[in-house]
DNA sequence: ATTGGATTTGACCGCTTGGTCAAAGACACG
DNA sequence: CGTGTCTTTGACCAAGCGGTCAAATCCAAT
């Protein structure tokens, strides 16, 4: 399986197939609720074949989480300290909401993980994530200090953005059960824009 | 076990013990991740003994969800159409946040359920819950029409309250990992009050 | 066409899980 | 105290689980 010349064409295809299937299954059933058989079937492979590419169920899950953390944090990273404060924050909200719309499975995977105490990514939370948030919270505080946006608790502001945007992915079933057939993503952007404009306009 | 004179003293005690243990275990591991043995141990009973009081794992879970739905919806029910709009909504936010602080396990139980597609409570969502929300959204809309609060999408307003308050229970680990030792519930009430005041003040 | 490595699979294993059952023990009440 | 009911439990079972393995098959390069 491993040679000095990098992964085969088949290896690349099957690994991608497995990760996509695993994302589907893990995000809808949680780690414990997902079975290797389910993932294999979803990927169109036999179970031993799947375990030929990943040594264990745990390994698939880890690979998923690792690959996703960066993607998930990217929108926050690109919040530009030199830009116009309100534009920057509204842009972050928009990007984050778009992530919920396009990548709901990724959102639910993280939600599952954190709900259950984040046993596998706790280090990343109190390490990488915390440093990033500290950094951006300082930027927001500086915008407040210079009177460019209204005063708010910077950390809670960031939490609120995570919460409000991911809600539309994680609680999709509930949202749709309540509003009926209409697509929540049609009206959510305007609502969130209004909310953060009114909250932050100095 | 069942007689015509209602439950025994022992039955009452053990059923309560089991439901509390089950809430603890289900909320931290999800339905599939929880084992009957875990619940039994947490309750201080043997597994067969536990299954003497509830016929199956499923039955325990159902009993929990059933008993909780009302508790969970109560704060919204008591939103008074005759009261002062801003006071009513801020009161709802405060009550909901307090629920997250005092009953995080209940919040996580629901979150787990909805994350996985709400297989066991979908009827309640599109039935009881939907009617309640329709009702309260109409109240909010009337407040908007009469100019008592600023115009916002009533359904998204309600979603935002659920999202922002439950976030502090469901994502507790993440929140604490980011802000360190400080208790998020110390600063959250003020943040949320500010947010909804600025959003809704006409 | 042959060969050596990459890929796939059916059969299997040990463990955990939800659930059962018969028998023993605790309890209430005459 | 005795008796019938409620409660508790050790032993057990079948199904599902993650994972293994040897053998079969495929594939690319010579």
Image: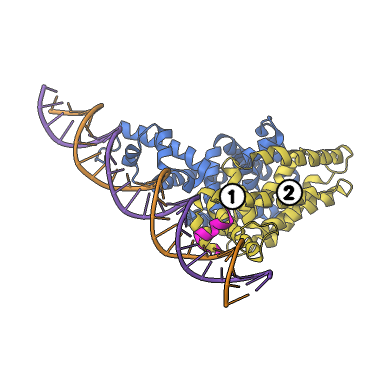
Chain colours: A yellow, B blue, C orange, D purple
Query: Which residue position holds label 1?
Result: A59
Please name which of the two marks, 2 or 1, marks the residue nearer to the observer. Answer: 1
> A69 above or below C23?
below
Q: Quadrant of the N terminus of chain B?
A: top left
- Front residue of C1/B135: it is C1
Magenta stretch: give its range.
A43-54
In screen coordinates, is B44 left or right of B107? left
In screen coordinates, is B105 left or right of B61? right
In this orientation, does residue B195 appear?
no
Q: Position of residue B94 (x, y in %)?
A: 63, 38
Magenta residue check for A48: yes
Query: Which residue position holds label 2?
Result: A73
Q: Residue drawn at (74%, 43%), measured in percent from left and top? A: A158
**Disc 2 secondary structure class:** helix
In screen coordinates, is B59 left or right of C4? left
Q: Position of residue A12 (x, y in %)?
A: 65, 62
Magenta segment, prevailing SS (helix, strand or loop): helix
Chain where mark 1 sits: A
């Amino acid at each position: 399986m491993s040679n000095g010349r990098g992964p085969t064409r088949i290896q690349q295809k099957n690994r991608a197939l497995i990760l996509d299937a695993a994302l589907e299954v893990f995000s809808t059933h949680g780690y414990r609720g997902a079975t290797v058989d389910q993932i294999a079937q979803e990927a169109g492979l036999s179970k031993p074949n799947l375990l030929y590419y990943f040594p264990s169920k745990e390994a698939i899950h880890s690979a998923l989480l690792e690959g996703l953390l960066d993607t998930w944090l990217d929108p926050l990273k690109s919040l530009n300290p030199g830009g116009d404060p309100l534009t920057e924050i509204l842009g972050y909200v928009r990007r984050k909401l778009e992530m919920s719309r396009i990548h709901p499975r990724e959102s639910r995977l993280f939600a599952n993980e954190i709900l259950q105490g984040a046993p596998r990514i706790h280090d990343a939370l109190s390490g990488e994530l915390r440093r990033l948030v500290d950094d951006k919270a300082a930027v927001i505080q500086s915008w407040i200090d210079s009177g460019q946006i209204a005063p708010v608790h910077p950390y809670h502001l960031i939490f609120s953005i995570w919460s409000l945007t991911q809600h539309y992915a994680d609680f999709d079933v509930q949202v749709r059960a309540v509003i009926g057939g209409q697509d929540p993503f049609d009206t959510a952007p305007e609502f969130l824009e209004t909310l953060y404009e009114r909250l932050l306009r100095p």
